[in-house]
């Protein structure tokens, strides 16, 4: 009996050992590779190391952004299985629902840690590090974020970083990016994102059961993104923002000989730093619902009647078509009558006898009613479109640019099924009625007039300008006469922008006032006229051309021209800085430069830039009615 029991026990032991042997063979030989891989995965962690983004500079080498560390807390999906979610939510200051939404996203990969919270401050980091042993696999990592050094200034150009969207993940160059990666979402940050973002690196580390790093197994360093030097001058941008104050509007400044954008400001603006820190839904909603529309790029996306700035086009068309002689005078008694309608001049008492030069200097409406009658709307349309109005400029900022409208008889017949009337030509001749343009179109038009008729593709990158895309074939005499009159607008007593003449540089330009409503039967700022000013400087060899638009600003001479003056002086100021004395105690002298009838004192050590306006008048202060 005892022997049988011993034999039965032996059989059981042998059977158990045999089963164990079979299982060991299965684990080590047949399934060895699989379990070896799982073991490696448990002890190894692959971490992405972000690449520093390239720096964005202005044309003078001033950095507009800088890279800053952004801290986030992450966890691998495998480590999350044994963690109490409620305790984790208390540690991170998140709700259970927020954590579950992040870890259950379909785009998550089992091999890439999931970011639970971004934008941690140092107090939060210390709190997490102190409790990390209670949550194996939880770790703090550093990413590269952005700080926009000038805040709202230039935000519509520079843009901002934001989290990658679901739609963007499908793009070939972004499909391997983590779900919470920060990429360029607007402006230059988006336009040159692939160039700026560089190549992320990778660290393979060994960790213990608590997720603590034991040793570095392998490392591939990240590669910094390329820097981008823009054509803009941040000094102009700042001067423009200060000059606008609380007013809404836009300014675009262009280098006439290259097409480089020197400044592009749209106000009110927004702070891109809010986006780089991870904007909250409520903050985004407030931006979108703000009645002042800070996210609207008024320079490209808003179109308005150009007012009297359009008289430049009408004058060019008339000269080119030989419809007027420069010295031929027209009497202005305060307006004209056409049937039962009357078309007034802004100066109720009239300008008296007016020639081409005086018509632009003092902005006589009556003169341009007669000019418009002589040439007709289709000739006006021809030269306006030749100068770039009524169509996109082609500046790529990844937003939809408005085209504006330059009407013609064909347009009205096709669009409105109506014939064109002479009264509509009167309105169009002075930039009212159906005519609408954008600030960037007006700046390009002014640059084309200033540089002798050359059309350049606009660019935001310094040194990337190419040859002109074309040339508007205008007679040299036409441009000389028009530019001479535009110099008089600013530098001659009686000119509508005379109060904005500069002791630093000779400015030529044209004021404009665009009606918001035809008859002022209502009051309030939003019903005030819009103010325009287009300009170039210096007069003889222009280096900057610009357009200023002040929404509900009133008159161009009093609201828009001073902004242009500040912008132009900000551009020329650095090169006019007084040189350092050669010897200690040496003092520079003073000088005065005569600009025709205008004598301008010049600060010590400075030389004026082209202080020779084409024509001057005598006596009286300039008016601000246009």
Image (cartoon, rainbow, N blue to C red):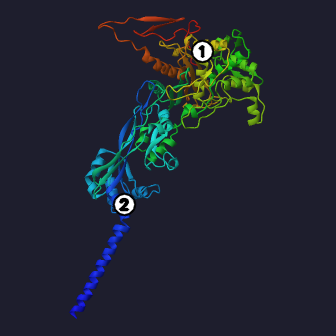
Residue 367 in view of the camera: yes
- Identify the secondary structure beneath mark 2: helix
Q: Nearer the viewer, residue 190 or 42?
A: 42
Q: Nearer the viewer, residue 594 or 333?
A: 594
Q: Residue furthest left?
A: 2
Q: Total label count?
A: 2
In space, the residues marked 2 and 1 are separated at their CA atoms by 78 Å
The image quarter containing residue 417 is top right
Q: Residues within 10 Å of mark 2 (few under 14, many from 20)?
A: few
**Residue 509 x %, y %:** 57, 17
Q: Which residue lies at the image location 66% right of the left edge and 11% below the top edge?
A: 477
Image x and y of residue 455, in percent: 61, 23
For residue 37, which numbered disc appears in the image? 2
Expressed as whole percent of the image width and height from the top left, the position of residue 35 reads 36, 64
Residue at numbered disc 1: 486
Relative height, residue 65 to residue 21 (above, below): above
Q: Quadrant of the N terminus?
A: bottom left
Q: Earlier in the sequence, mark 2 or mark 1?
A: 2
- The quadrant in which residue 533 appears is top right
């Amino acid at each position: 009996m005892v022997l049988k029991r011993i034999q039965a026990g032996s059989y059981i032991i042998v059977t158990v050992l045999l089963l164990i042997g079979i299982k060991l063979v299965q684990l080590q030989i047949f399934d060895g590779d699989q379990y070896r891989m799982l073991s490696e995965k448990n002890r190894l962690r692959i971490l992405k190391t972000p690449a520093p983004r390239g720096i964005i500079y202005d044309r003078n080498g001033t950095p507009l952004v800088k890279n800053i560390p952004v801290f986030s807390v992450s966890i691998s999906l495998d480590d999350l299985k044994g963690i109490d979610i409620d305790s984790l939510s208390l540690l991170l200051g998140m709700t259970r629902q927020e954590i579950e939404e992040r870890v259950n996203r379909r785009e998550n990969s089992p091999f890439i840690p999931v970011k639970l919270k971004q934008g941690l401050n140092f107090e939060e980091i210390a709190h997490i590090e102190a409790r990390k042993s209670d949550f194996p696999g939880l770790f703090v990592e550093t990413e590269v974020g952005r700080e926009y050094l000038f805040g709202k200034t230039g935000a519509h150009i520079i843009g901002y970083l934001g989290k990658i969207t679901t739609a963007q993940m499908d793009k070939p160059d972004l499909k391997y990016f983590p779900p919470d990666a920060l990429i360029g979402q607007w402006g230059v940050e988006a336009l040159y994102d692939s160039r700026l973002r560089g190549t992320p690196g990778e660290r393979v580390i060994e960790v213990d059961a608590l997720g603590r790093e034991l040793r570095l197994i392998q490392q591939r360093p990240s590669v910094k993104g390329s820097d981008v030097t823009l054509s803009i001058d941040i000094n102009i941008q700042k001067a423009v923002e200060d000059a606008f104050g609380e007013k809404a509007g836009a300014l675009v400044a262009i280098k006439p000989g290259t097409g480089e954008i020197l400044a592009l400001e749209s106000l009110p603006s927004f702070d891109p730093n809010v986006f780089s820190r991870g904007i909250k839904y409520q903050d985004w909603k407030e931006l979108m619902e703000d009645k002042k529309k800070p996210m609207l790029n008024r320079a490209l996306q808003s179109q308005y009647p150009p007012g009297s700035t359009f008289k430049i086009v009408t004058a060019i068309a008339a000269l080119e078509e030989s419809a007027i002689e420069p010295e031929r005078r027209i009497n202005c008694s305060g307006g004209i009558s056409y049937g039962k309608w009357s078309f007034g001049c802004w100066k109720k008492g009239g300008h008296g006898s007016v020639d081409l030069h005086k018509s632009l200097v003092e902005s006589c409406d009556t003169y341009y009613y007669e000019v418009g009658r002589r040439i007709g709307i289709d000739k006006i349309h021809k030269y306006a479109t030749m100068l770039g109005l009524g169509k996109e400029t082609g500046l790529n900022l990844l937003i939809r640019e408005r085209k504006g409208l330059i009407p013609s008889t064909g347009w009205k017949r096709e669009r409105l099924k109506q014939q064109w009337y002479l009264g509509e030509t009167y309105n169009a001749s002075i930039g009212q009625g159906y005519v609408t343009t954008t600030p960037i179109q007006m700046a390009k038009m002014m640059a084309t007039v200033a540089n002798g008729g050359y059309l350049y593709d606009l660019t935001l990158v310094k040194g990337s300008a190419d040859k002109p895309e074309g040339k508007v074939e205008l007679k040299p005499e036409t441009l000389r006469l028009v530019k001479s009159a535009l110099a008089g607008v600013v530098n001659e007593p009686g000119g509508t922008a005379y109060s904005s003449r500069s002791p630093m540089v000779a400015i030529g330009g044209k004021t404009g006032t665009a009606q918001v409503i035809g008859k002022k039967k209502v009051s309030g700022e939003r019903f005030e006229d819009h103010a325009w000013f287009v300009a170039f400087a210096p007069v003889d060899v222009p280096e900057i051309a610009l357009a200023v638009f002040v929404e509900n600003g009133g008159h161009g001479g009093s609201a828009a021209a001073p902004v242009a003056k500040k912008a132009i002086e900000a551009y020329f100021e650095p090169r006019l800085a007084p040189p350092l004395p050669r010897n200690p105690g040496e003092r520079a002298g003073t000088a005065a430069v005569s600009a025709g009838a205008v004598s301008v004192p010049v600060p010590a050590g400075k030389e004026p830039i082209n202080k020779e306006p084409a024509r001057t008048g005598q006596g009286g202060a300039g008016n601000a009615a246009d």
